[in-house]
Amino acid sequence: MPSHAHASSTVEDMTLALRDALGLNAPYAPELPREEAISLFRRHLARFQSHVREEFEAHRLGGADAGKLLAGYTDGMIRTLCEFATRSVRAESHAKGEISFAITATGGYGRGLLAPFSDIDLLFLTPDEPSDEVRGVVEYILYFLWDLGLKVGHATRTIDECITEAEADTTVRTTLLDARLLAGDAALFAMFEARYIVACVTAGAACFITDKRRERAARHHRFGDSPYLVEPNVKEGRGGLRDLQTLYWMCRYTFGTRHVSDLLAPGFSALGLLTEQEAKRARRSWDFLWRVRFHLHYVSGRAEERLTFDVQPVVGGRMGYTRHGRQVGVERFMRHYFLTVREVMRLTLVLEPAVLRQALGPIANAPQADAQMRDAGFTVMDGRILPERGTSFEHEPIQMMRLLAWAKKRKLPIHPLAMQQLIRWERHAATLRGNAEASSIFLDLMCGAPPERARHGAAGTPPAAVQGDDAPSFHQMDEGRRKGNAYWLHILNETGLMGRLLPDWSRVVGQMQFDTYHVFTVDEHIIDALRILERVEHGSMADEIPLAYELARNLHSRRALYVAVLLHDIAKGRGGDHSEIGSEIALHVCPELGMDSEETETVSWLVLHHLLLSHTAFQRDIDDPKTILDLADIIQSPERLRLLLLLTIVDMRAVGPRVWNAWKATLLNELYMRVAEVLEGSMATTERDVRVARAKAATAQWLAEDGLPEGDIAHFMGLGYGSYWLSFDRDTHRRHIQLITESEARQSPLTVESQPIPARGVTEVTIYAADHPGLFSRIAGAVAIAGASIVDARIHTMTNGMALDTLWVQDADGAAFEEPQQLARLSMLVEQALSGQLNINREIATCGRRGSGRRMRAIHVPPRVVIDNRASNACTVVEINGRDRPGLLHDITATISDQKLQIASAHITTYGVRAVDVFYVKDLFGLKITDKARLETIRQTLLAGLQKAEADATRMTSALDTVTI
């Protein structure tokens, strides 16, 4: 690591060389033409930028040091440019007098730190209204910098204007807080500094700090609230650089701290707020985030602040993170990032309340500790709970849990000194494993008390607005995601207590999943799922998920459900099936938490099967009786079915905002109802022929009651094979007979009908056409070109040789296709595809060019084909995993058709960039495929097609990227 003295001398030497080349060191040197000067500056700029990059990438400079060096070089360049510009303007205008102004660095540049592609923020300070000569110099400098390709934020103001603007706008006040003289009139800048400090003192810190906290809350909301997003913003995200800078600004106002380095320096601990070790961790966090930001800029070639999937492996590799055991380098890098973010949040929790007290004074009418609380070893200061003098977390670790219990009971926030002690002594919480009192407190913090249903009115009526009854409103960082039980779980997680009480938890802290399906790290996902479960139970999501609210109203195994949610993903990142490993973990964690054998067995079973309902609903034919009966055999109990559905719902809702939709809710609801019927003994399990006969008789009766002619009913009843009558409800059959009757009356070879169903989040598309091999493949291609996605399909061949295909489609946002122009275009494209007027492959290739770019391709999705002959009695089930892209379904179904197979139904699900397409297929005779050799041929052919299509798509998109870059 080069010394600061060496870096400083390098900057001075390089700046001196530039001055010599410009002739600034020779008083009578001839004036250089502007173009020649620009060439000299451009070479100087490239030289010092290359030097900083070389030193940084060779690991001779840390992140913050690289930012300082880059700012130092820029300082020298701007000072030199100021002198050159002044001389040039003087020569042109023949000005004799002094050109009085000052150039100051503001914002991040004013703090003496620059990232490679950051803006250079400049304030041109003038004593009064700028003269023509001053305007000339300012314009010369600005146009010169722009010609160098630099991004410059600038303002030209007098001192009075600066004070007025700062009083009116907190952003301007913050920017000027870091003003630093670069060149020009030092006396003018000193006057500005003195007047600005007086203005700040007069205005007081209270308003400024309130504005900064409000600004931070809005920024956190804009960038996703959680610090554990899998594609975080290094600069603006929660726990990022801007949060540290916000702390610095607050301390500037309150303690007179000049630089962030002062904030993190060991000397700052003299205030009694940070220990030396905590200050050291904070400095490491500051430098780590700056290193990540530098790498991010260099890799992206622009001022990119978001760690997207495509750059994460690159940045991680540049920082030296490689595979270790089962964990790949990018996951190790991102885990370090998230643990660093946690350190920033800890620093905020400790420092900010102290700043607020200093700036705003003690809280008026703050609650006081009562005798009972004092007897327990706790007191209240500034309305916040902390341990009494003499209470030792080191010698009595149970007091850490009791502190949280009292805070919850009295609805008190935790004092920063108490937070410090919790973090400092969290390792002693390991002795509390199996401790009955600690386990009881932990479960109470996580589960809370069950809602009082009596006050919610009549049974089945959700409350208008109910918050968890243990939900405190006092949390200083209470911004949406940190309410109710989530508040306490975040404290347990961020202090490290959770990982000490549950060693398996520590393995998922900061554990990211390198895919586009999950939005949060594993620990944050679990906490969010518990938050959602509490909201469901208290009825605040009754409008969104009414079924879940009804299920949660009278749970007999409430505590087991909460613990199952806590443990459902606890084994992520260990290799193998995380459900099986998690189930084993539950068997020893639950007894430690004081749960009995029945609860333990229930939790273990729920963790083992927590993906069962979603897998069945989205990837299997729930109209197939065997699917329902197999599921009922596994579940066996109505209470377990309720618990499993609630676990499934909160798990999916916590994955990300776009994962849960009306269509998935509909499928899960239908699956639940059908399995519940079996478990209650009311579902008919008679032979298929009997059920078909009953369905046909019921349909004929409904149609007769609707007044349809007897001849039309008899004709319609003779068209469908057995599976058709078991697949649709009364309303659908009514629409089908109308569609078929009108089509035959017109003698139309093709009829397409679309019906949006917004309540289910889909549009139902019915196609009646002459059946032929490859029909569904062509339809799938047309749907892809229209910009829609098929999420489910039923394919039926009628006795008259016509195909009646029913598709349920969504738009790119997971909603129904509703706009008239969308529906008209979809119908037109289907007609063109089936009549041969549309070149499907060419149009899909065009769609592919608009598809995902490098960010999505960074996620590896290996093609996979699984054939299951046990899931259905009548069909062979083919499950295909691959990268989602326009035309994937078209390619797969074309291959299936080439293999002389009929598709009975299709079920399509996407998980980020991974698509899982499941087909129920038969041979040309309508039979299940049983020959092992043929099954293997089908599998290999589909796999080869997937691999070729993936390679072609990647090659095509890469070629397009090359052209557009």
Image: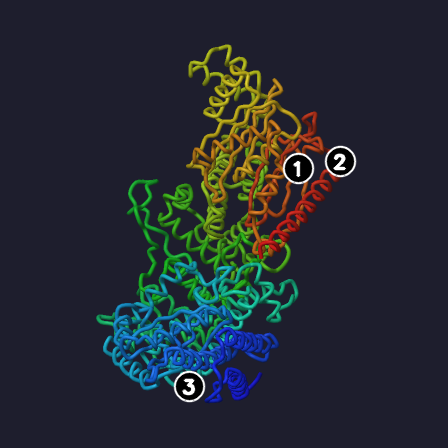
Determine the image quadrant of residue 832: top right
Q: What kind of element bears circle 3? A: helix
The answer to the question of whether label 1 and label 2 lie on touching residues, with beta carbons closer than 8 A, is: no
**How did the renderer colour the structure?**
rainbow
The image shows residue 346, relative to residue 758, as above or below, that is below
Residue at image mark 2: 934
Q: Amino acid at mark 2?
A: Arg
Looking at the image, can residue 284 be seen? no
Q: Which one is earlier in the sequence, the residue at label 2 or at label 3? A: 3
Q: Position of residue 423 (x, y in %)?
A: 45, 74
Residue at image mark 3: 267
Determine the image quadrant of residue 298: bottom right
Dot 2 surroundings within 10 Å: few (below 14), some, or many (20 or more)? Answer: few
Q: Amino acid at mark 3?
A: Gly
Residue 870 numbered tag: 1
Q: Nearer the viewer, residue 611 or 769?
A: 769
Q: Compute the Cα span from label 1 to label 2.
A: 17 Å
Looking at the image, can residue 492 be seen? yes
The image shows residue 163, relative to residue 876, as above or below, that is below
Q: Compute the Cα span from label 2 to label 3.
A: 76 Å
Between tags 2 and 3, which lies in front?
Answer: 3
Report the side of 465 relative to 691 (left or right).
Answer: left
Q: Amino acid at mark 1?
A: Arg
Quarter that holds the C terminus: bottom right
